[in-house]
Amino acid sequence: MPQADKHALPTHKPGSIEGSTMACNDATARRNALQNAFDYRGDVTLDLQDGSHLVGFVYLYNEPGDQVHLFVPQGKDSLPQTLPASRIARVRFTGEDTAFGKSWDDWTAKAEKERQKEADRLAKEAVARGEL
Amino acid sequence: MPVPISQAWTVASYVLGQKLRGNKHYPLVLMLEPLFRCNLACAGCGKIQYPDHVLSKRLTPEQCWSAAEECGAPMVSIPGGEPLIHPEMDKIVEGLVARKKYVYLCTNALLLKRKLDLFKPTKFLTFSVHMDGLEPEHDAAVCRDGTYKIAVEAIREAVQRGFRVTTNTTLFEGTDPSRVRLFFDEMMKLGVEGMMLSPGYSYQKAPDQEHFLGRERTKKLFSQILANRKRSWKFNLSPNFLEFLQGNVDYECTPWGNPTYNIFGWQKPCYLLQDGYVPTFKQLMEETAWEQYGHRSGNEKCRDCMVHCGYEASSVDDTFGSVPGFARTVKAALAYGT
């Protein structure tokens, strides 16, 4: 593939907000960004007003209480953390969208050989974790 | 009788007690999700798509017991994820049984045979094995060959050792009713106590939105499956719920009937929707805007749902809520042998 064509490829997965950024310039934009972060099945990076960043999985957005709850990875585990939504300047969808490409249609659209390969890979991963 | 008389009595007296106290919103089954990690990755499942650090999180036994006490429901269903991955599942179950909760441990059975020694047969514990049909249908549904055979072997072993075993089947678009009927025959031959059935739900966050059943298609499918049913088939469901699935009776959803607790807290409003979390069961019951949920609410997310976690509690409530409801139950029970 010519380099020019490679650069023309989308930077994020089509149909997914992975790789995108949402600014929190006002209350409406903040609500939209954080609701998307709550719905997103991957980690996000929260850029805070003071210039710092926080990476984690947003599992609750309490809009009336102005609070965002997330699990922040700490090694293999993660710990809960809460911060005021008003401290967030923008939301970047930096983690893998774990729901992307896993629909039944995606699965059946794959060639049998490819499905078998994926099933074998997932089984091996489960064995490695001691779960099979 | 697909459930022990003691269980039927416990549930009946619990529901009647709630009715006598005038409690409209009471839980029937606690849905306890101690982890989201699974050793399968079924297409269409809305429960397992999370980052690795979230999948690695586990509820502790103490958190599980505390949730059961806080909720007070007489039955606890443990789905997931795959509960048998949890290293302390035996301890969790032991503690729930000590609290005289009727536990349904929902499993794909891939680890069941290996872990059976960790559990003791008791009327309080049932292994509810995920089986989505005969071998080709089941293996296709769970996206891995060989799963059906392993599950069947585990069911045989568990039954032989004296455990209560049921099957738990989710039916999706494209299901062949005649194949489901053959599947029922096979499961009953294995000696399971009863079978649970439910139409699939189109999870808001699930990647698969096209293979779930709409209401009319659900009613048609279940009518075909359950027509001229065999006396040998036993269902671990309220008979009125089976009538509901066929469109013979209409219910509104009871979203508070099967409250869900997991690593994020108490899930609003139900097992299937994730509109937020609260730290206490009391807050879940008091702060959830229940009128915004259910088929008649007009909520788009509830439009096609006929899943047992919303409607089984409705059918049980109907049984004990009126004389006609009780009569309906008796009539349906005689028809289904439940």
Image (cartoon, coloured by chain):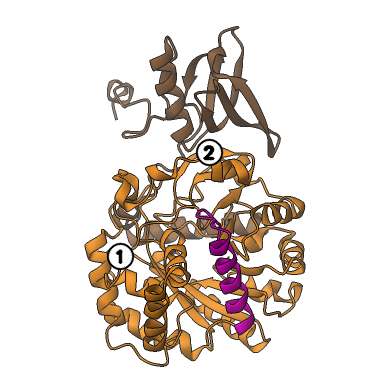
Chain colours: A brown, B orange
Identify the residue at horizontal 34%, vertical 46% (top origin). Answer: B301
Q: Which residues are magenta?
A: B5-27
Q: Nearer the viewer, residue B75 or B262?
A: B75
Which disc is residue B160 wearing? none
Q: Is residue B36 visible?
A: no
Name the dominant secondary structure of the magenta segment. Answer: helix
Identify the residue at horizontal 48%, vertical 20% (top origin). Answer: A91
Q: Is residue B323 visible?
A: yes
| Residue A87 horizontal/vertical position (percent) | 57, 13
Callout 2 crowding tier (Cα within 10 Å): few <14, some 14–19, many ≥20: few
User: How many marks are shown on the rendered structure?
Assistant: 2
Name the residue beneath numbered marker 1: B250
The answer to whether residue B305 is above or below residue B166 is above
Whether residue B184 sits left or right of residue B70 in the image: it is: left
Identify the residue at horizontal 42%, vertical 10% (top origin). Answer: A26
Whether residue B324 sits left or right of residue B147 in the image: it is: left
* 1 and 2 marks on the same chain: yes
| Residue B333 horizontal/vertical position (percent) | 42, 84
Instruction: Compute the Cα span from label 1 to label 2.
Output: 27 Å
Q: Are marks 1 and 2 in contact (CB under 8 Å)?
A: no
The answer to whether residue B140 is above or below residue A23 is below
* B177 in the magenta segment: no
Chain of the residue on which disc 2 is drawn: B
Residue at the outermost top position = A50
Task: Give the amino acid at mark 2.
Answer: Glu
Name the residue beneath numbered marker 2: B287
